[in-house]
Each structure stands twice: as C-alpha cells, then as structure tokens.
Amino acid sequence: MDIKRYSQADEALLFDMLREEGEEWSDYYNQKGYDKYKKALVSSITYVVYDGSTLCGYARCREDDGFGVYVYDLLVRKSCRGRQLGRMLMEQVCRDFAGQPIYVMSDVDPYYDKLGYRKEGSIFQVTVN
C-alpha cells in the first residue's frame, strides 16, 4: 500500500471511484458539483491510497491554523474494504498533524466507533428563514 498526497494525476481515478460508490457521492461528481469538488480536493489536504495502480481510497481534510484538523471525507473502494485502509489513512493524518486534535465530520458514526474514536459534539446546518 502506498499513501501519498493527492495530485491532479489522481483526479480521474478518484472521480471514477466516487461514481462507483453511487448516488450517495453524486454531489461531488454530478454536473453541478464536479468543478467545485475538484477545487476542494486541491485546496484541501487530501491523501490517496494505492495498491499498485488501483486507487483504493482517499481522505480529504483541512487544518484550522493549529486549532485542529477536520476530516471531511473518507472513502475506501468497496472492493478494497476490510484491509484497514481507512484506518491507515486516518493514521497518516494523525502522523502529519501530531500534536493537533483530529476531528471527523461523520455521517457513518458506527465506522468511527469501531476504530475507537470518541464522539464530541454535533454538526448543525445553519439556515436562515
């Protein structure tokens, strides 16, 4: 397994993986979101994990000027699951930002519970009526 920082050379394979995941990730690959997400990948701290030439997964996060690192996206290709790749990606984030708290923006809480992470707080979407 090879974990590295995302580059534009990974773009096509990453978007192919998102499409394979289906509707749940469509906000990132549909016509409306594609260009925005390309920018988000580049402006974020994004890691990819490969097994040979196969893109197996990725993690996208942002640093908050020393106040913490927020993981927004973590995905492992279905055919590559069960090999601890999600854990490896999270461990890479922790190594690269040692000494800072790492927070996950999760919609799959049982996965992070399984990894032994402690839940802190909630996320609210703000809307103006």
Image (cartoon, rainbow, N blue to C red):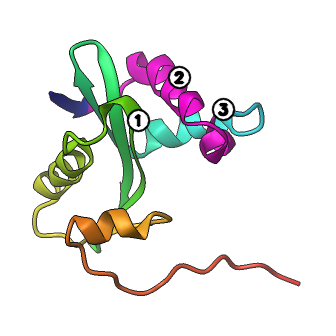
Rendering quarter of residue 111:
bottom left
Q: Which residue is mark 1?
A: 78
Q: Residues within 10 Å of mark 3 (few under 14, many from 20)?
A: few
N-term mark: 1 or 2? 2
Left or right: residue 54 versus residue 40 is left
- Residue at 60 percent across and 80 percent down: it is 124
Q: CA distance from mark 1 to mark 3?
A: 25 Å
Q: Amino acid at mark 2?
A: Asp
Left or right: residue 21 versus residue 62 is right
Q: Which residues are magenta?
A: 5-29
N-term mark: 1 or 3? 3
- Residue at 49 percent across and 28 percent down: it is 17
N-term mark: 2 or 3? 2
Q: Which residue is mark 2?
A: 16
Q: Position of residue 31 (x, y in %)?
A: 76, 31
Of the numbered discs in the image, which one, if any, rests on residue 35?
3
Q: Amino acid at mark 1?
A: Lys
Magenta part mainly helix, strand or loop?
A: helix
